[in-house]
Amino acid sequence: MSLREKIRIGDDRMHLRLTDEQEMVRKTIRKFVEKELIPLENDVLRNEREGKPSLPEGKMEELQQKAKEAGFWGINTPEEYGGADLGQMMLAIVQMEVARTFVPFKFGGSADNILYYGNEEQKEKYLLPTINGEKKSCFAMTEPGAGSDTRNLRMTAVKDGNEWVLNGEKTFITGGNEADFVMAIAITDKELHKSSNGRKGVTCFIVDRDMGWGSEYIHTMGEWGPAALIFENVRVPEENILGEIDHGYDLGLEWIGFARWIVGARAVGAAERLLNMAIDYANERETFGKPIATRQAIQWQIADSAVEIEAAKWLVLNAAFTLDQGEDNRHYASMAKLYGANMGNNVIDRVLQIHGGMGYTRELPIERWYREARLWRIYDGTDEIQRLIISRNLLKGHVKIG
């Protein structure tokens, strides 16, 4: 048997193309984005310039309902909870397509991955209402002065009868201003936390807003509006512990790890759209009697961008595919996040340069994307943290080259 024949009948990993079903879903979502979302871009830009919410109240729910009617609800939610359960590969593709616009949108019918670790009562009270769009959640691990140092927590939870009393502050929490409840990580055993170098002695609590925590809007250079969450003697019943007591750090890592490669997927989608804008502009814009597309300086920027987008795409898809196989994808997720975020920043910078002065104005959405993209290299683990993780895995032999 020849090597070529062996490859043909070998592992499915050798198949480097989307299935017919995946391609059909991708095309359908792109049509949805082009029909329902991209036409809203001018309105979103105008609203943001005037200090208003990007979308008016109720618009997100209206768009989610349209998507549901088209069959897109709970993209990655298990079928037993009414979702489509399309898998991580399909989720990556969905994220790439939705990221082709800056209009803030996400498909309905989903919930944070760690909420599925809840018991039956918690699922009934928090998971199902979140999936159904009746409640909004957020996850809170990052603290002031700690940032990516996830083990350097200060927020405490002290047992008092059948309740835990939470004190501390969380910062840069996505969705924290809108959330009805938060999944907050707090120290429950100081000695264990110290002796385990921060890996144990912390617990995840589900905390309703009406239990007493407050949120404050944090203004940023982009349109992302995170929150600072304040906990002052917030009393939480014992039944609101998510997962095992003193083992909340593992849940936190699982939430963060899932988010990392999604950042790479979003960077790919945005970069593809922006590069297409640059190509169209280069063919139309003339200097000294010729389109700038004929200039080598422009051609090389376009070529480098296309190569980098393709490389980032495969890193993201590999991270998703590995997770679909039930394997640990954390190493690949860090690679996808690190390379994807930097690729996105590089491509957007080139696209702005190709557009010249117009790219710098607010007449075009490039400057908005530019501000948003800078965040990709920071949240859910900075560039430096990803490099630390990748190098550590290699140097300690957890992952082998080749």
Image: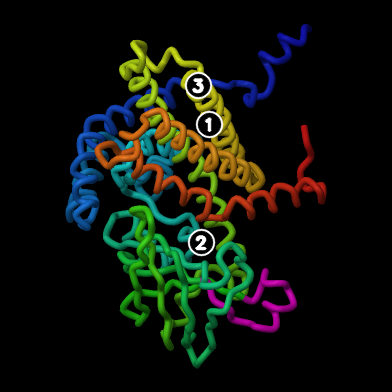
Q: Are marks 3 and 1 in contact (CB under 8 Å)?
A: no
Q: Label 2 belongs to which residue?
A: 117
Would residue 90 be visible to someone looking at this image?
no
Q: Amino acid at mark 1?
A: Lys
Would you say residue 12 is visible in this rendering?
yes
- Residue at 50 percent across and 92 percent down: it is 160
Q: Residue at x 32, y 44 (%)?
A: 107
* Residue 229: x %, y % from top left: 41, 74
Is 135 in front, or is 244? 135
Mark 1 secondary-structure assignment: helix
Q: Residue 111's spot in the image, x, y percent?
A: 40, 55
Start and end of the magenta stretch?
185-201
Q: Nearer the viewer, mark 1 or mark 2?
A: 1
Residue 196 counted in the magenta span:
yes
> Which badge, 2 or 3, is on the more N-terminal residue?
2
Q: Which mark is residue 313?
A: 1
Q: Are marks 1 and 2 in contact (CB under 8 Å)?
A: no
